[in-house]
Image (cartoon, rainbow, N blue to C red):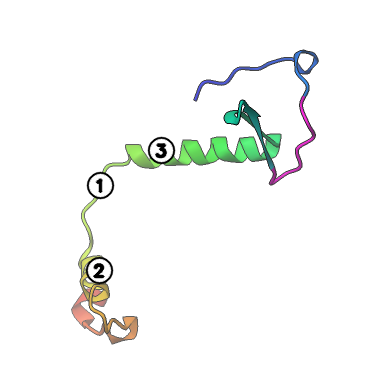
Amino acid sequence: MNVQTIDSQSVRLPHVAPGDVVVVTRYSAQCAVVVHPEDYEEMQRAREIVARLGRLEPRSLTAVEASVIRSAQDEDFDLNLIRDEDLLH
């Protein structure tokens, strides 16, 4: 995301409370969105987390993980029914 900083003297912005978003329209089309700085920082952190997760290399599942996934695909899945002692050690 490209970020452009504009001095507050150059624009008129409404007050935006944390958790609120102001959508600016021109001729009925969205042309800008104004968010609270704390919300913007949270969105930036979320973008960084997603970017980092995208760079992770996949790993192989352990026997227990594979068993749980196979069992969870069954409609009658109950985690308490997994009792294979070899998988639990």
Q: Is residue 39 left or right of residue 48?
A: right
The Cα–Cα distance between marks 1 and 2, rounded to whole angstroms, is 16 Å
Q: Residue at x 78, y 31 (%)?
A: 14
Q: Earlier in the sequence, mark 1 or mark 2?
A: 1
Tell me the amino acid under the disc marked 2: Ile
Which residue position holds label 3?
52
Cα separation, mark 2 vs mark 3, equals: 25 Å
User: Which is nearer the eye, 25 or 83?
Assistant: 25
Q: Upstream in the sequence, badge 2 or badge 3?
A: 3
Which of pointers 1 and 3 lies earlier in the amino acid sequence?
3
Q: Is residue 20 visible?
A: yes
Crowding around mark 2 (Cα neighbors within 10 Å: few <14, some 14 to 19, many 20+) is few
Percent of width and height locating residue 42: 60, 41
Quadrant location of the C terminus? bottom left
Residue 18: image location, x then y, percent? 73, 44
Q: Is residue 73 above or below residue 2?
A: below
Frontmost of labels 1 and 2 is: 2
Q: Main secondary structure of the magenta part?
A: loop
Q: Where does label 2 land, which residue?
A: 69
From mark 1 to mark 3, how far is it between C-alphas?
13 Å
Please name the residue shown 25% across and 68% down the image.
69
Please tell me whether mark 1 sits on a helix, a strand or a loop: loop
Q: Which residue occupies 21% across, 54% down? A: 60
Residues at marks 1 and 3 touching, judged by CB atoms closer than 8 Å: no
Magenta-highlighted residues: 13-20
**Where is residue 19 shown, x and y percent of the image?**
69, 46
Q: Amino acid at mark 1?
A: Pro
